[in-house]
Image (cartoon, rainbow, N blue to C red):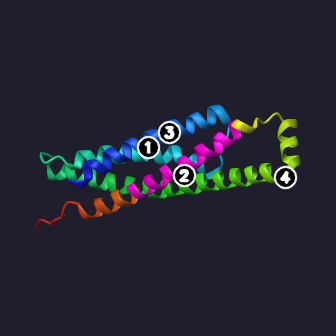
Amino acid sequence: MLRPWLGVASCVFCIFAIIFEVLVFVFYFTFLGLEFFGLIAAIFGIMHGFCGMMTSKADCSFQTRQTIFLVDFTVSVLFAFMSFGMLCGTAAAFSIYLFVAAMVGTTPYVLELMALFGIPVVPFLTLIALKGFATVVYIILFSVAVAAAVSNRRNRPHFIAVA
């Protein structure tokens, strides 16, 4: 009974990831390296969620379950790798932003440089808070991806060779 809930959780967190990354890109124009994997992971996560909900139905034939399992296993492994890349990218961005914020707080000329380039301080600090929140959400998302892959491995249909 764990599969449908993992599917729903994957869909919810991935839709949040898409919305969050698009909003951050639109308002702050900041993508950093591996965060591009976030959108790809979100697409894989939504596919994985639908596959998980489909395999939980009791009225599926064996061939349907076998096909869905093979697709779902591939998707869940890719989802786990992509969400790990997304987590690394977001954590790296958060670390860089936090480092710059520490420089802003401790080094006077950084504020002057930000003023020179027209970078507002308050939105920058809200961006740091958003990235920290996103890092926590992506840790949860990576945990869901790993749990889904493990659950997928345990719930696979038994392939019996018929002579």
- Please, what is the three-letter code of the amino acid marked with disc 1? Cys
Q: Position of residue 108 (x, y in %)?
A: 87, 48
User: 156 or 151, which is in the foreground?
Assistant: 151
Mark 2 closeness class: few <14, some 14–19, many ≥20 residues within 10 Å: many
Label 1 secondary element:
helix
In whole angstroms, how far apart are the C-alphas of marks 1 and 4?
38 Å
> Does the residue at mark 4 contact the one at mark 3 (Cβ under 8 Å)?
no
In the displayed structure, would residue 56 be above or below residue 20? below
> Disc 4 or 3, which lies upstream in sequence?
3
> Mark 2 or 3, which is nearer the eye?
2
Label 2 secondary element:
helix
Residue 18: mark: 3
Residue 150: mark: none
Label 3 secondary element:
helix
> Mark 4 or 3, which is nearer the eye?
4
Mark 3 closeness class: few <14, some 14–19, many ≥20 residues within 10 Å: some
In the displayed structure, would residue 163 be above or below residue 140? below
> Does the residue at mark 2 contact the one at mark 3 (Cβ under 8 Å)?
no
6 vs 81, left or right, is left
In whole angstroms, how far apart are the C-alphas of marks 3 and 1?
6 Å
Mark 1 closeness class: few <14, some 14–19, many ≥20 residues within 10 Å: many
Is 163 part of what is drawn in magenta? Answer: no
Mark 4 closeness class: few <14, some 14–19, many ≥20 residues within 10 Å: few
In whole angstroms, how far apart are the C-alphas of marks 2 and 1?
13 Å
Q: Which residue is mark 2?
A: 135
- Please, what is the three-letter code of the amino acid marked with disc 2? Thr
> Disc 1 or 4, which lies upstream in sequence?
1
Q: Which residue is mark 4?
A: 107
> Mark 2 or 1, which is nearer the eye?
2
Q: Which residue is at 89% across, 47% downward?
A: 109
Q: Which residue is at 20% across, 60% downward?
A: 157
